[in-house]
Image: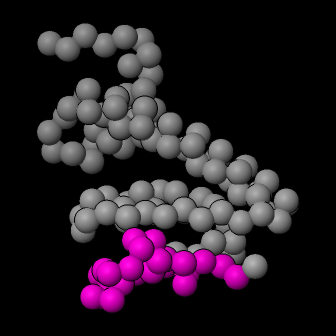
């Protein structure tokens, strides 16, 4: 039998906790607790991203975030979680195809420079 703290019980009794338990056929309390912790932390980080975006816009600055990796490496999910709460009027996503033979012979980040915002 699993031992749960008062804090764990509160997490399981939350809306996210109950939803997670009911969503799965097999009940896994530890997994549900991790999920509730994860969603709480994700929300806090998304709030911080909103603050950072507002500060960057206010100061007239620009930021480039570059994701690079193999197919199915989790880039899409990470990008979705980062962008789902920030103001979509102030960012764009560019998905580049596999590098051409010419691009493979160039400096690695050369292909990205064409996509950078103009000053």
Q: Is residue 26 left or right of residue 65?
A: left
Q: How many marks?
A: 0
Image quarter hosting the N terminus:
top left
Q: Quadrant of residue 114?
A: bottom right
Pinpoint residue 35: horizontal percent, then vertical percent. 35, 37
- In the figure, 102 relative to 64: above or below? below
Q: Residue at x 40, y 71 (%)?
A: 108
Whether 103 is among the magenta residues is yes
Q: Quadrant of residue 18?
A: top left
Q: Residue at x 64, y 46 (%)?
A: 47
Pinpoint residue 2: horizontal percent, then vertical percent. 20, 14
**Observer-nearest of 50 and 93:** 93
Image quarter hosting the C terminus:
bottom right
Q: Residue at x 85, y 60 (%)?
A: 58
Pinpoint residue 60: horizontal percent, then vertical percent. 83, 65
Q: Residue at x 65, y 45 (%)?
A: 48
The magenta segment is 94-118
């Amino acid at each position: 039998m699993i031992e749960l703290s008062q804090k764990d019980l509160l997490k399981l009794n939350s809306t996210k906790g109950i939803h997670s338990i009911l969503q799965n056929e097999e009940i896994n309390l530890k997994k549900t607790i991790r999920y509730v912790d994860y969603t709480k932390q994700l929300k806090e980080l998304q709030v911080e991203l909103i603050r950072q975006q507002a500060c960057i816009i206010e100061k007239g600055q620009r930021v480039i975030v570059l994701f690079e990796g193999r197919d199915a490496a989790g880039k899409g999910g990470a990008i979705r979680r980062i962008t789902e709460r920030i103001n979509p009027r102030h960012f764009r996503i560019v998905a580049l195809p596999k590098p051409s033979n010419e691009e493979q012979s160039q400096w690695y980040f050369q292909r990205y420079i064409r996509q950078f915002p103009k000053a």
